[in-house]
C-alpha cells in the first residue's frame, strides 16, 4: 500500500454517482440471490425470480443496465476510484472492518492542537470563548485579530466532546 503524501487528487463522487452505484449494486445483488432485478418498487406483474433463459427477463436486465449507463451525469468510476484512493493512502484504519479514520490522524490532530493551544495560551474551551471576546476588543489590526480568532475557533472545534458540551 502507498503512503499518504499529503496530496490526493481524485474527483469526488456526487450524490448522483452514488445513486447510480447503489442502483447497480441492487441489480447485481438481486441477480446473485436469484431475484428479478429492478430499480424502485416492483409492479403488480413483476416476476419474483429471475430466469436467465427467459429472453424477456434478459431484455429487462439489459434495459436496467442501459438506463444506468445512459445517465450522463453518473460516474461509477468516481465512486470506485474514490474508495480505491482512500484505501491506497492509508486514510482509513487498517485494523478496522468499518470506515474509521486511521488513528495516526487523531494523533497528529492532538499534536497540532497542543501546539496551537501553546501558541494561543490555552486549550480550555471556556477560556478560549472568553479569550475570543477579549481579542475582539483589543486595539489590534483586523488581520491579527482574525488570525487569533481563527486559531481559537480551531481549538474549540477540535476540543474533546465532553469539554465542548459543558463549556
Image (cartoon, grey):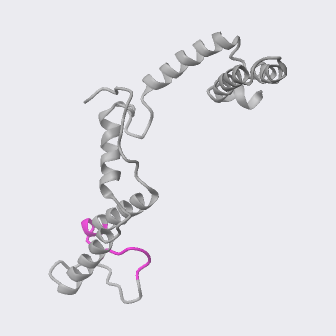
The residue at the point 27 percent across, 74 percent down is: 66
Q: Along the line of sight, which residue is nearer the eye, 141 or 90?
A: 141
Q: Is residue 49 above or below residue 114?
A: below
Q: Along the line of sight, which residue is nearer the eye, 9 or 161?
A: 9
* Magenta-colored segment: predominant secondary structure: loop
Q: Is residue 96 above or below residue 73?
A: above
Q: Along the line of sight, which residue is nearer the eye, 28 or 117?
A: 117
Q: Is residue 139 visible?
A: yes
The magenta-colored residue range is 30-42
Give the percent coordinates (x, y) of residue 2.
Answer: 26, 29
Specify whether 19 is left or right of 34: right
The verdict on residue 94 being magenta is: no
Give the percent coordinates (x, y) of residue 19.
Answer: 42, 62
Q: Is residue 92 above or below residue 29?
A: above
Quarter assignment of residue 117: top right
Specify whether 13 is left or right of 28: right
The residue at the point 36 percent across, 62 percent down is: 74
Amino acid at each position: 500500500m502507498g503512503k499518504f503524501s499529503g496530496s490526493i487528487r481524485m474527483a469526488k463522487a456526487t450524490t448522483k454517482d452514488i445513486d447510480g452505484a447503489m442502483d447497480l449494486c441492487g441489480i447485481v445483488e438481486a441477480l446473485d440471490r436469484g431475484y428479478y432485478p429492478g430499480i424502485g418498487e416492483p409492479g403488480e406483474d413483476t416476476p419474483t425470480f429471475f430466469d436467465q433463459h427467459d429472453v424477456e427477463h434478459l431484455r429487462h436486465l439489459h434495459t436496467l443496465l442501459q438506463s444506468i449507463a445512459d445517465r450522463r451525469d453518473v460516474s461509477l468510476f468516481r465512486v470506485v476510484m474514490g474508495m480505491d484512493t482512500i484505501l491506497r493512502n492509508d486514510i482509513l484504519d487498517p485494523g478496522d472492518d468499518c470506515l474509521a479514520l486511521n488513528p495516526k490522524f487523531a494523533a497528529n490532530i492532538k499534536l497540532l492542537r497542543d501546539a496551537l493551544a501553546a501558541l494561543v495560551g490555552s486549550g480550555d474551551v471556556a477560556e478560549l470563548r472568553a479569550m475570543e471576546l477579549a481579542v475582539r476588543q483589543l486595539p489590534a489590526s483586523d488581520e491579527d485579530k482574525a488570525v487569533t480568532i481563527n486559531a481559537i475557533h480551531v481549538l474549540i472545534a477540535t476540543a474533546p466532546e465532553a469539554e465542548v458540551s459543558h463549556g
